[in-house]
């Protein structure tokens, strides 16, 4: 065999060895890159899910679990062995790129894990205190926006569950009347926690409305509670916007409501029928609590115990919503001043 032939054989063997080594080293690193990409995909999925409507909460949990699982893959990436030909500049460069990608992905995993740990607390601060973990959003939305029944803060969780299971609005109002003492106690308990200066001036009137219905002065209780609710809307929410435009602005599809918006949206849902106009004549009386009928017409058939209870519950919900909103506004203002 000539020297040229021997040299050629050596080159071929070296090429085969290099190819085998390349396959042995690059295969796990290709998997590593794929794992890193998977981790980034999970992170994007979780971040996207955090702004999705509340009904997608299950998907958030699933994506979170997958993201945490992916973080274990990142730990393996950081322990990848150096290639046997580390002295070769090409392999050293590949190794540095892989290790850098692993470090960056591990850091992203750490930040994501910290966010996931804080997520339940973030949700808890925004979740309605009287709601179950798996509410029937469609029924609650219908109760609030169609039937004008408050579903946030009051009534309490047990009574709310009974209302959800009831056949129709009349059955729900009957339940509220039967549980009048309980409903009023829950309203008083919620109002006791309200103390922001922006709404505190109306609290004595709220207590007077509750005392009126306890004394069976239903018309007085309803009229006073409706008037207070109207004042709260005008002072802090409706402003100079006319009633019709403001009412229309509250008609939000419950499927589009995000977690951070649940309390405000569902607290204001009953305001939609509450602001329905009525001008008498041949027009039938609204079957739900109406500000227009109560304030402008004082129709005897509309001023009754059921509507009085609903009015007090709506008034209470608005107090709670605004107390929370105004304190958050104050904290944001202080934070902005500190950052300036």
Image (cartoon, helix red, strand yellow):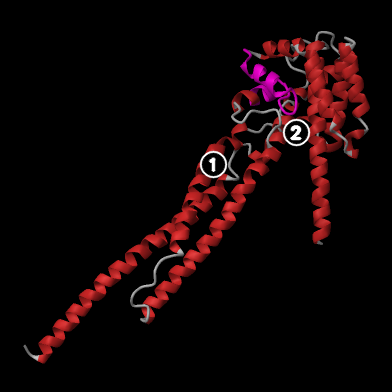
Point 81% across, 11% down: residue: 305
* Residue 248 at x, y percent in the picture: 71, 32
Count how many numbered circles sit on residues in the image.
2
Q: Is residue 278 visible?
A: no
Q: Which sits in the foreground, 51 or 116?
A: 116
Q: Quadrant of residue 128?
A: top right
Q: Which sits in the foreground, 320 or 115?
A: 115
Q: Quadrant of the N terminus?
A: bottom left
Image height check: is 117 above or below 32?
Answer: above
Point 74% across, 17% down: residue: 288
Lateral position of residue 74 relative to residue 161, left or right: left
Q: Quadrant of residue 6?
A: bottom left
Q: Is residue 225 visible?
A: yes
* Residue 301 at x, y percent in the picture: 81, 8
Residue bearing mark 1: 61
State how far apart marks 1 and 2 are (Cα).
38 Å
Is 159 a magenta residue?
Answer: yes
Q: Residue furthest bottom?
A: 3
Residue bearing mark 2: 245
* Residue 196 at x, y percent in the picture: 88, 38
Image height check: is 34 above or below 158?
Answer: below
Lateral position of residue 6 relative to residue 98, left or right: left
Point 67% across, 43% down: residue: 121
Bin the neighbour count of mark 1 within 10 Å (Cα to Cα): few under 14, some 14-19, many 20 and up. Answer: some
């Amino acid at each position: 065999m000539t020297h040229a032939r021997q040299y050629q054989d050596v080159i071929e063997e070296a090429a085969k060895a290099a190819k085998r080594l390349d396959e042995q080293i690059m295969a796990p690193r290709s998997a590593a890159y794929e794992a890193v990409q998977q981790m980034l995909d999970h992170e994007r999925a979780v971040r996207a899910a955090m702004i999705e409507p509340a009904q997608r909460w299950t998907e958030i949990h699933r994506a979170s679990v997958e993201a945490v699982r992916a973080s274990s893959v990142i730990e393996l990436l950081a322990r990848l062995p150096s290639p046997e030909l580390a002295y070769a500049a090409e392999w050293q460069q590949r190794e540095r790129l892989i290790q850098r990608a692993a470090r960056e992905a591990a850091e992203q995993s750490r930040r994501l894990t910290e966010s996931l740990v804080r997520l339940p607390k973030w949700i808890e601060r925004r979740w309605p205190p009287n709601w179950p973990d798996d509410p029937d959003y469609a029924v609650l939305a219908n109760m609030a926006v169609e039937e004008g029944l408050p579903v946030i803060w009051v009534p309490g969780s047990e009574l709310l569950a009974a209302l959800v299971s009831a056949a129709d609005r009349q059955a729900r109002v009957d339940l509220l009347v039967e549980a009048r003492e309980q409903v009023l106690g829950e309203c008083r308990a919620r109002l006791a926690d309200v103390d922001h200066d922006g709404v505190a001036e109306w609290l004595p009137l709220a207590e007077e409305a509750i005392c009126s219905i306890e004394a069976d002065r239903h018309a007085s209780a309803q009229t006073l509670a409706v008037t207070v609710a109207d004042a709260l809307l005008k002072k802090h929410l409706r402003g100079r916007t006319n009633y019709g435009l403001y009412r229309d602005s509250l008609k939000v599809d419950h499927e589009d409501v995000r977690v951070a918006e649940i309390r405000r949206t569902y607290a204001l849902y009953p305001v939609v029928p509450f602001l329905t106009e009525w001008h008498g004549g041949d027009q039938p009386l609204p079957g739900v609590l109406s500000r227009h009928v109560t304030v402008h017409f004082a129709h005897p058939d509309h001023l009754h115990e059921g509507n009085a209870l609903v009015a007090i519950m709506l008034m209470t919900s608005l107090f709670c919503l605004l107390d929370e909103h105004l304190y958050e506004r104050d904290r944001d203002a202080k934070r902005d001043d500190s950052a300036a």
